[in-house]
Amino acid sequence: MKPLFAVFALTLAAGCAPAVQASAAVAVTGAWCRAAPVGALTGGCYLTLTADADDRLISVATPAAKRTEIHSMDMTGGVMRMRQLKDGLALPAGKAVTLKPGAEHVMIIAPKKTLAAGGTVPLTLTFKTAPPKKISAPIRDAATPATHHHEGH
Ligand SMILES: [Cu+2]
Protein backbone atom coordinates (compact mmCIF):
# COMPACT_ATOMS: atom_id res chain seq x y z
CA MET A 1 0.00 0.00 0.00
CA LYS A 2 2.79 2.39 0.92
CA PRO A 3 4.66 2.31 -2.45
CA LEU A 4 1.40 2.80 -4.29
CA PHE A 5 0.69 5.95 -2.32
CA ALA A 6 4.17 7.28 -3.14
CA VAL A 7 3.60 6.81 -6.86
CA PHE A 8 0.21 8.46 -6.64
CA ALA A 9 1.66 11.46 -4.79
CA LEU A 10 4.39 11.88 -7.41
CA THR A 11 1.92 11.73 -10.29
CA LEU A 12 -0.28 14.27 -8.57
CA ALA A 13 2.65 16.65 -7.99
CA ALA A 14 3.69 16.40 -11.65
CA GLY A 15 0.12 17.00 -12.79
CA CYS A 16 -0.18 20.14 -10.68
CA ALA A 17 3.11 21.72 -11.75
CA PRO A 18 2.68 24.81 -13.92
CA ALA A 19 3.12 24.09 -17.63
CA VAL A 20 6.22 26.31 -17.86
CA GLN A 21 8.12 23.95 -15.58
CA ALA A 22 7.21 20.89 -17.60
CA SER A 23 9.52 21.94 -20.46
CA ALA A 24 12.50 24.19 -21.03
CA ALA A 25 11.75 27.90 -20.92
CA VAL A 26 13.66 31.08 -21.60
CA ALA A 27 12.89 34.26 -19.65
CA VAL A 28 13.11 37.47 -21.65
CA THR A 29 13.67 40.76 -19.83
CA GLY A 30 14.59 44.35 -20.61
CA ALA A 31 13.86 44.18 -24.34
CA TRP A 32 14.19 47.42 -26.30
CA CYS A 33 15.00 48.63 -29.79
CA ARG A 34 17.11 51.64 -30.63
CA ALA A 35 15.24 54.49 -32.27
CA ALA A 36 16.54 55.08 -35.81
CA PRO A 37 16.33 58.16 -38.03
CA VAL A 38 13.81 58.29 -40.88
CA GLY A 39 15.11 56.26 -43.83
CA ALA A 40 17.59 54.23 -41.75
CA LEU A 41 18.33 50.89 -43.39
CA THR A 42 18.98 49.03 -40.16
CA GLY A 43 18.13 49.10 -36.50
CA GLY A 44 19.15 47.23 -33.40
CA CYS A 45 17.19 45.47 -30.67
CA TYR A 46 18.56 44.36 -27.33
CA LEU A 47 17.35 42.06 -24.56
CA THR A 48 18.37 39.74 -21.77
CA LEU A 49 17.69 36.01 -22.06
CA THR A 50 17.88 33.49 -19.23
CA ALA A 51 17.29 29.84 -20.10
CA ASP A 52 16.50 27.26 -17.37
CA ALA A 53 18.28 24.55 -19.35
CA ASP A 54 21.06 24.85 -21.92
CA ASP A 55 19.47 26.29 -25.02
CA ARG A 56 20.21 28.43 -28.04
CA LEU A 57 18.56 31.47 -29.60
CA ILE A 58 18.18 30.29 -33.18
CA SER A 59 16.41 33.17 -34.86
CA VAL A 60 14.41 36.32 -34.33
CA ALA A 61 11.63 37.43 -36.65
CA THR A 62 9.51 40.55 -36.90
CA PRO A 63 6.77 41.63 -39.27
CA ALA A 64 8.21 45.17 -38.89
CA ALA A 65 11.24 44.52 -41.10
CA LYS A 66 12.26 42.69 -44.23
CA ARG A 67 14.82 40.58 -42.39
CA THR A 68 16.24 40.08 -38.92
CA GLU A 69 19.64 38.66 -38.02
CA ILE A 70 21.47 37.86 -34.79
CA HIS A 71 24.81 39.70 -34.79
CA SER A 72 27.86 39.93 -32.62
CA MET A 73 30.15 42.92 -32.52
CA ASP A 74 33.82 42.97 -31.69
CA MET A 75 36.84 45.16 -31.92
CA THR A 76 39.35 43.90 -34.51
CA GLY A 77 42.47 46.02 -34.99
CA GLY A 78 40.70 49.09 -33.63
CA VAL A 79 37.70 48.64 -35.93
CA MET A 80 34.24 47.63 -34.71
CA ARG A 81 33.04 44.73 -36.80
CA MET A 82 29.66 43.05 -36.86
CA ARG A 83 29.18 39.50 -37.90
CA GLN A 84 26.11 37.36 -38.24
CA LEU A 85 25.80 34.47 -35.80
CA LYS A 86 24.52 31.90 -38.28
CA ASP A 87 24.17 29.20 -35.61
CA GLY A 88 22.49 31.57 -33.20
CA LEU A 89 23.52 32.46 -29.70
CA ALA A 90 24.30 29.97 -26.91
CA LEU A 91 22.18 30.32 -23.76
CA PRO A 92 23.86 28.42 -20.91
CA ALA A 93 21.48 27.17 -18.19
CA GLY A 94 20.70 29.76 -15.54
CA LYS A 95 23.03 32.40 -16.97
CA ALA A 96 21.62 35.75 -18.07
CA VAL A 97 22.83 36.51 -21.61
CA THR A 98 22.49 40.19 -22.44
CA LEU A 99 22.34 41.51 -25.97
CA LYS A 100 23.40 45.15 -25.79
CA PRO A 101 24.85 47.97 -27.86
CA GLY A 102 28.47 47.22 -28.72
CA ALA A 103 28.00 43.48 -28.22
CA GLU A 104 25.53 40.85 -29.42
CA HIS A 105 22.36 42.35 -30.84
CA VAL A 106 19.34 41.65 -32.99
CA MET A 107 19.77 43.46 -36.29
CA ILE A 108 16.62 44.73 -37.92
CA ILE A 109 17.27 44.99 -41.65
CA ALA A 110 15.16 47.21 -43.88
CA PRO A 111 12.52 48.27 -41.34
CA LYS A 112 9.10 48.70 -42.97
CA LYS A 113 8.50 51.89 -41.05
CA THR A 114 10.61 54.32 -39.07
CA LEU A 115 11.72 53.00 -35.69
CA ALA A 116 10.49 56.01 -33.76
CA ALA A 117 10.91 56.37 -30.00
CA GLY A 118 7.66 55.56 -28.20
CA GLY A 119 6.67 52.82 -30.66
CA THR A 120 7.16 49.08 -30.28
CA VAL A 121 8.64 46.31 -32.38
CA PRO A 122 6.98 42.86 -32.16
CA LEU A 123 9.64 40.14 -32.03
CA THR A 124 9.27 36.38 -32.21
CA LEU A 125 12.21 34.58 -30.65
CA THR A 126 12.87 31.00 -31.72
CA PHE A 127 14.92 28.70 -29.50
CA LYS A 128 16.46 25.31 -30.12
CA THR A 129 14.55 23.63 -27.27
CA ALA A 130 12.25 26.10 -25.51
CA PRO A 131 8.98 27.07 -27.18
CA PRO A 132 9.08 30.27 -29.26
CA LYS A 133 8.40 33.51 -27.44
CA LYS A 134 6.57 36.57 -28.75
CA ILE A 135 7.48 39.88 -27.19
CA SER A 136 6.90 43.53 -27.88
CA ALA A 137 10.06 45.65 -27.54
CA PRO A 138 9.64 49.36 -26.82
CA ILE A 139 11.62 51.74 -29.05
CA ARG A 140 13.85 54.11 -27.12
CA ASP A 141 16.41 56.74 -27.98
CA ALA A 142 19.88 55.30 -27.59
CA ALA A 143 22.01 56.43 -24.67
CA THR A 144 24.99 56.66 -27.01
CA PRO A 145 23.99 58.96 -29.90
CA ALA A 146 27.64 59.33 -30.98
CA THR A 147 27.41 56.30 -33.26
CA HIS A 148 24.46 57.63 -35.24
CA HIS A 149 26.45 59.70 -37.69
CA HIS A 150 28.46 56.72 -38.87
CA GLU A 151 25.53 54.48 -39.66
CA GLY A 152 24.52 54.09 -43.28
CA HIS A 153 27.96 54.85 -44.75
CU1 LIG B 1 24.37 44.22 -36.57
Image (cartoon, grey):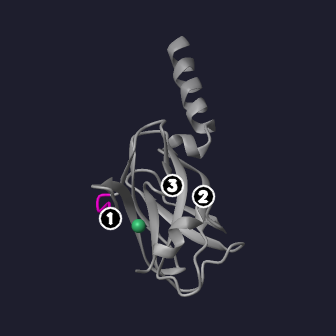
Chief secondary structure of the magenta span? loop
Identity of the residue furthest to the right in this view: 118
Q: Which amino acid does label 3 sit on?
A: Lys
Give the mark nearer the N terminus: 3 vs 1: 1
Which residue is disc 3 drawn over? Answer: 100
User: In the picture, which quadrant includes the N terminus?
Assistant: top right
Which residue is disc 2 drawn over? Answer: 31
Measured in 3D between alpha carbons, the distance from the residue under mark 3 to the one under mark 1, in whole angstroms, is 15 Å
Q: Which amino acid does label 2 sit on?
A: Ala
Give the mark nearer the N terminus: 2 vs 1: 2
Give 97 or 125, whichever is nearer the viewer.
97
Q: What is the quadrant of residue 80 in the picture?
A: bottom left
User: In the picture, which quadrant includes the C terminus?
Assistant: bottom left
Is residue 127 placed above or below 84 in the rendered structure? above
> Which stretch appears magenta?
83-87
- The picture places residue 82, in percent across and down from the top left corner, at 35, 63
Q: What residue type is labelled 1?
A: Gln
Which residue is disc 1 drawn over? Answer: 84
- The picture places residue 134, in percent across and down from the top left corner, at 57, 64
Label 2 close to label 1 by CB (< 8 Å): no
Measured in 3D between alpha carbons, the distance from the residue under mark 2 to the one under mark 1, in whole angstroms, is 20 Å
Q: Which of marks 2 and 3 is in front?
A: 3
- The picture places residue 59, in percent across and down from the top left corner, at 40, 64
